């Protein structure tokens, strides 16, 4: 799939009408987009630059752009709840998912995070995405293929339980592990066994009891650094002259993020030194 340049047949095109409603078409020679606002020939779009305006047979204007990854993630079919773009962004940067990294992800769910991970590590890296439910894995594979136009060669989507994964399955320890599942605390020893010393482990949990269980589990294992926990709140703003203000509504909670790093074999975390209280 092309990410830039004039539109080609096979591209996914997002048409936006004057009421900011989006419609998506895949460009085909001789194809037509029908709406109550008239018809647009796909041949009128092919060859145009992104950001152009096309006019339907009934005189309505539509802006044309390629789908961004966020558009795809928010509109694609899903079997399980996806990691939202604001949290995926935190994961990529705070977890330092570098180009060429070898990454283990579980569960793959609908494949939303898989896409961000695949783009971050690139063809020199590898992403292993384990998913215990075959119907969810099917969503993940379809969604990733649809976004990339084909299945990326550096992606290994795998039906299976994280509990059964071995270092041999992954061809050696991985640089990064990210878990998005109900009970990640059940798999902390497994993460330790699969992660390289210095590697980053992140997990994403929705509720406070889950957060507490993961934090306590990480501390008990004594093979990780003191974990960090946080959440990200994103507030949109309406910017309109003197009426400029934050939007009334926002997504107040998605999930908490937890991050820690694996210590070298045989090392336990140095005890924290706190100032004595008076
Ligand atoms: C919330 S979804 C993941 C969504 C995904 N991160 C995304 O952005 O699309 C959680 C998934 O974890 C899977 N899962 C739960 N336990 C698992 C395990 N032990 N091994 C592999 N997958 C597991 C579930 O079947 C479910 O599909």
Image (tube, rainbow, N blue to C red):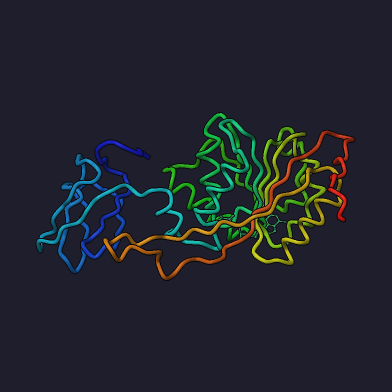
**Which residue extends farthest front?**
278
Depicted 168 relative to depicted 163: above or below? above
Instruction: Depth check: give the residue in front, 61 or 271.
Output: 271
Q: In the image, what residue occupies the spot 74% across and 33% down?
A: 172
Judge whether 128 appears above or below 257 on screen. Answer: above
Quadrant housing residue 171: top right
Image position, residue 136 (x, y; %): 58, 59
Residue at 83% from the left image edge and 51% from the top image edge: 219
The quarter of the picture showing ligand 1: bottom right
- Tell me which corner region of the image, top left, top right, bottom left or bottom right, holds residue 239: bottom left
Q: Position of residue 134 (x, y in %)?
A: 62, 58
Residue 97 sits above or below residue 55 on the image: above
Question: Image check: 93 left or right of 74?
Answer: right
71 or 240: which is nearer to us?
A: 240
Q: Tell whether 133 sits left or right of 74.
A: right
Residue 256 placement (x, y as % from top left): 64, 58
Residue at 69 percent of width and 62 percent of height: 182
Q: Nearer the viewer, residue 117 or 212?
A: 212
Q: Residue 227 placed where, x, y %?
A: 74, 49
């Amino acid at each position: 799939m092309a990410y830039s340049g004039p539109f080609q047949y096979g591209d996914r095109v997002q048409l936006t009408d004057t009421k900011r409603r989006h419609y998506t078409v895949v460009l085909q020679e001789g194809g037509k987009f029908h709406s109550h606002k008239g018809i647009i020939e796909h041949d009128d779009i092919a060859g145009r630059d992104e950001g152009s305006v096309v006019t339907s047979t009934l005189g309505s204007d539509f802006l044309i752009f390629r789908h961004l990854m966020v558009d795809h993630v928010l509109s694609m079919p899903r079997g399980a709840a996806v990691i939202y773009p604001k949290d995926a962004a935190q994961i990529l940067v705070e977890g330092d998912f570098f180009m060429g990294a070898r990454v283990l992800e579980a569960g793959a769910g609908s494949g939303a995070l898989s896409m961000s991970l695949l783009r971050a590590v690139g063809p020199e890296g590898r992403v292993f995405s384990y998913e215990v439910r075959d119907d969810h894995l099917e969503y993940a594979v379809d969604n990733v293929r649809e976004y990339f136009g084909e299945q990326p060669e550096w992606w290994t989507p795998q039906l299976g339980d994280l509990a059964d994964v071995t270092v041999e399955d992954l061809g050696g320890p991985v640089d990064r592990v990210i878990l998005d599942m109900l009970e990640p605390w059940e798999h902390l020893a497994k993460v330790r066994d699969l992660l390289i010393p210095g590697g980053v482990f992140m997990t994403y949990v929705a509720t406070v009891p889950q957060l507490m269980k993961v934090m306590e589990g990480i501390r008990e294992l004594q093979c990780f650094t003191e974990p960090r926990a946080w959440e990200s709140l994103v507030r949109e703003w309406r910017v309109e002259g003197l009426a400029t203000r934050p939007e009334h509504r926002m997504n107040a909670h998605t999930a908490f993020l937890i991050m820690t790093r694996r210590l070298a074999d045989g090392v336990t975390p140095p005890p924290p030194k706190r100032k004595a209280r008076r």
